[in-house]
Amino acid sequence: MADIILTDANFDTEVLKSTKPVLVDFWAVWCGPCRVLGPIVEEVAKDIEGKAVIGKVNVDENPTVSQKYGIMSIPTIMIFKGGQVVKQFIGVQSKEVLVSELKKLMN
């Protein structure tokens, strides 16, 4: 399953109102570490398909959501459950770490 492109317009619907855990990757085109993390996030999406939602927010194109969550460094990964941030990572993370954190939240 491909990542969902999250925007200022659809963030509330896709993330905050989701009944499943949601992993959000805050990134930018010009960010080198973001390009390293991208394929890892795609692998996570394949591994947990149907059990959690995986989305990406381009911080340059969606400043409202990025500011709301205080994104100062990218890549930043936030995991949401029930509309709340339950875990946050800054920098490149391994697929295993991300899948493990999501599995803790799946019912």
Image (spheres, rainbow, N blue to C red):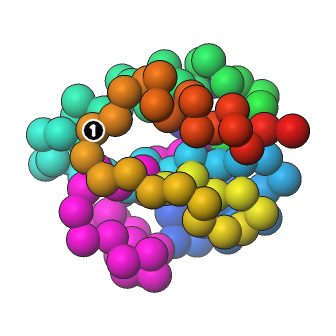
Q: Which residues are magenta?
A: 54-77
Q: Residue at x 62, y 18 (%)?
A: 47
Instruction: Verify whether residue 70 appears in magenta.
Output: yes
Q: Quadrant of the N terminus?
A: top right
> As rendered, which of 17 and 105 lies closer to the eye?
105
Which residue bears the numbered disc 1?
92
**Image quadrant where one finds the C terminus:** top right
Between residues 4 and 46, which one lies in front from this camera angle?
46
From the viewer's perspective, is residue 84 above or below residue 93?
Answer: below
Q: Is residue 2 visible?
A: no
Residue 56 lies in magenta, yes or no?
A: yes
Determine whether, in the image, residue 27 is placed left or right of residue 107: left
Tell me: 1 left or right of 44.
right
| Residue 50: percent from left, percent from top | 78, 28
Res. 103 visible in picture: yes
User: Is 39 situated left or right of 36 in this image?
Assistant: right
Q: Residue at x 12, y 40 (%)?
A: 32
Residue type at numbered disc 1: Val
Residue 12 coordinates in the image, percent (x, y) = 67, 70
Q: Residue at x 59, y 65 (%)?
A: 85
Instruction: Name the residue at 44% across, 75% down.
Output: 69
Element type at mark 1: loop
* Above or below, 103 relative to 10: above
96 to 62, vertically: above or below = above
